[in-house]
Image (cartoon, helix red, strand yellow):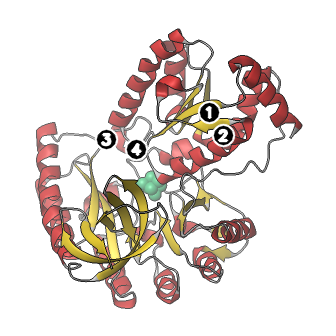
């Protein structure tokens, strides 16, 4: 606490106020959301509150993503735009964190082009953010910041990282390079944390990892962890992401089928429906194996909602191979999919593969998939019209609220509710990607 107090004192002198404001912008996945909540917990201890107005912030922090080249370019443009803000108030801090700055070339670029950035903290060292901050403020080193509390953005919604890094090295993916090898978190610590947040009112527990299925700690695997969390007393839902199809096995399906608290939503990225492309992607499963796993899961778990990720235009993907992806989507009928055009990332194996598909052709392919999936999603959603769904309110706007069902379907509700409320609704109509309901 002495350290916190001395930091607070330095900040008070710097800003001539008791409290300070932080603007936090998160790019990318839920893992980044979780990392940002950790940083926010630390900042809160120092006396920071949080603002959506970047112009009044004393600290501007970007939690960045490295998965797509275009996203990186956008983030760099955002950083460039901070120059004038820093110029008008040299007192503020600018921090760039996350996966993007885990890449040495990007880190050097930022240091060279944007010297007004105060500090950089890569994804692998996010736990060390307090030490970095301490060093920035005092010029001294410290290795002593444990047990900084997480500050949940929404109390009802808890991100629980269970495994960091990735060992899979899918040929298109930068994540194993920026987040490092898989490391499962302490089994008992995860359980204690879940007990604590459920007791404190968290209703959605989302277990996070690049590949949650490969969780393994002291002989406990992902199924063991799920079973133990399921035993905790309270009204809550267990979600998890992301699962890798190669590790998604019958044992896990059988476990899920017997959990009281499982959401009923499975996100299982397939990426391609063609075996040659899957092999070049280094995904380690075939189209047939994927279909078999989905069939087994659907057989065992009633009303399972399945979503996926698709990459189109992977180097060398022929039109016929792309059509295999189309036919897989039509066969499985996912509730929804995230579609991406292949994005070359320096340092990955696919970067050196010959990318001979024109941009127009990639756009044609993704447009085709979007259109087909829209029809499938609409059909899926229309099946809910007339049914009753229990939802949890996530956003409260004037005269309408945005909620989510247990199985992750977005429902728009007329009227105003409190964020975190659980509401029984009747679904009255469906739109392209969400449902419209009313309270019953
Ligand atoms: S499983 Fe593949 S796509 Fe997912 S993070 Fe690991 S390397 Fe990337």
Q: Give the residue at mark 1.
A: 121
Q: Indicate which label's residue lies in the foreground, 4 or 1.
A: 1
Q: Position of residue 377 (x, y in %)?
A: 20, 68
Q: Position of residue 260 (x, y in %)?
A: 53, 86
Q: 414 or 84: which is nearer to us?
A: 414
Q: Indicate which label's residue lies in the foreground, 3 or 2.
A: 2
Residue at 51 percent across and 62 percent down: it is: 211
Q: Indicate which label's residue lies in the foreground, 4 or 2.
A: 2
Count of picture labels: 4
Whole-angstrom CA distance, mark 3 to mark 2, is 26 Å
**SS category of the residue bearing label 2:** helix
Residue at 68 percent across and 41 percent down: it is: 44
**SS category of the residue bearing label 3:** loop
Q: Give the residue at mark 4.
A: 349
Q: Are marks 2 and 1 in contact (CB under 8 Å)?
A: yes
Q: 185 or 270: which is nearer to us?
A: 185
Q: Indicate which label's residue lies in the foreground, 4 or 3.
A: 3
Residue 133 placement: quadrant: top right
Whole-angstrom CA distance, mark 4 to mark 1, is 26 Å
**Which of the marked residues, 1 or 3, is nearer the chain's N terminus?**
1
């Amino acid at each position: 606490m002495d350290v916190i107090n001395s930091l607070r004192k330095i900040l008070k002198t710097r800003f001539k106020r008791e409290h300070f404001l932080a603007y936090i912008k998160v790019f990318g996945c839920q893992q980044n959301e979780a990392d940002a909540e950790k940083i926010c917990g630390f900042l809160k201890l120092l006396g920071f509150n949080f603002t959506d107005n970047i112009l009044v912030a004393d600290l501007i922090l970007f939690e960045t993503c490295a998965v797509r080249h275009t996203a990186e370019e956008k983030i760099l443009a955002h950083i460039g735009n901070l120059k004038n803000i820093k110029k008008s108030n040299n007192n503020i801090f600018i921090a760039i964190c996350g996966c993007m700055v885990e890449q040495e070339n990007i880190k050097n670029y930022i240091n060279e082009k944007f010297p007004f950035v105060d500090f950089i903290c890569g994804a692998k060292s996010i736990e060390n953010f307090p030490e970095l901050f301490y060093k920035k403020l005092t010029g001294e080193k410290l290795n002593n910041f444990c047990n900084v509390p997480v500050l949940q953005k929404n109390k009802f919604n808890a991100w629980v990282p269970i495994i960091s890094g990735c060992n899979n090295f899918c040929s298109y993916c930068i994540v194993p390079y920026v987040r490092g090898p898989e490391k499962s978190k302490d089994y008992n610590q995860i359980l204690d944390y879940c007990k604590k947040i459920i007791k404190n009112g968290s209703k959605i527990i989302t277990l996070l990892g690049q590949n949650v299925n490969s969780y393994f700690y002291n002989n406990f695997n992902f199924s063991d962890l799920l079973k133990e969390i399921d035993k905790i007393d309270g009204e809550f839902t267990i979600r998890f992401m992301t699962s890798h199809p190669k590790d998604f096995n019958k044992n896990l399906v059988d476990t899920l089928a017997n959990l009281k608290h499982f959401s009923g939503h499975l996100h299982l990225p397939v990426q391609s429906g063609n075996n040659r492309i899957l092999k070049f992607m280094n995904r380690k499963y075939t189209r047939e194996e994927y279909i078999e796993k989905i069939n087994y899961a659907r057989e065992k778990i009633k009303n399972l909602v399945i979503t996926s990720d698709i990459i189109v235009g992977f180097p060398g993907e022929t039109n016929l191979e792309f059509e295999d992806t189309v036919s897989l989507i039509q066969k499985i009928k996912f509730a929804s999919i995230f579609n991406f055009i292949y994005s070359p990332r320096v340092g990955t194996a696919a970067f050196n593969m010959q990318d001979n598909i024109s941009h127009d052709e990639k756009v044609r392919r993704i447009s085709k998939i979007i259109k087909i999936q829209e029809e499938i999603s609409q059909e899926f959603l229309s099946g809910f019209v007339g049914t009753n769904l229990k939802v949890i309110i996530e956003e409260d706007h004037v005269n309408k609220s945005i909620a989510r069902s247990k199985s992750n379907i977005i429902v728009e509700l007329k009227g105003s509710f409190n964020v975190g409320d659980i509401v029984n609704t009747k679904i009255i109509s469906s739109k392209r990607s969400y449902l419209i309901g009313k309270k019953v």
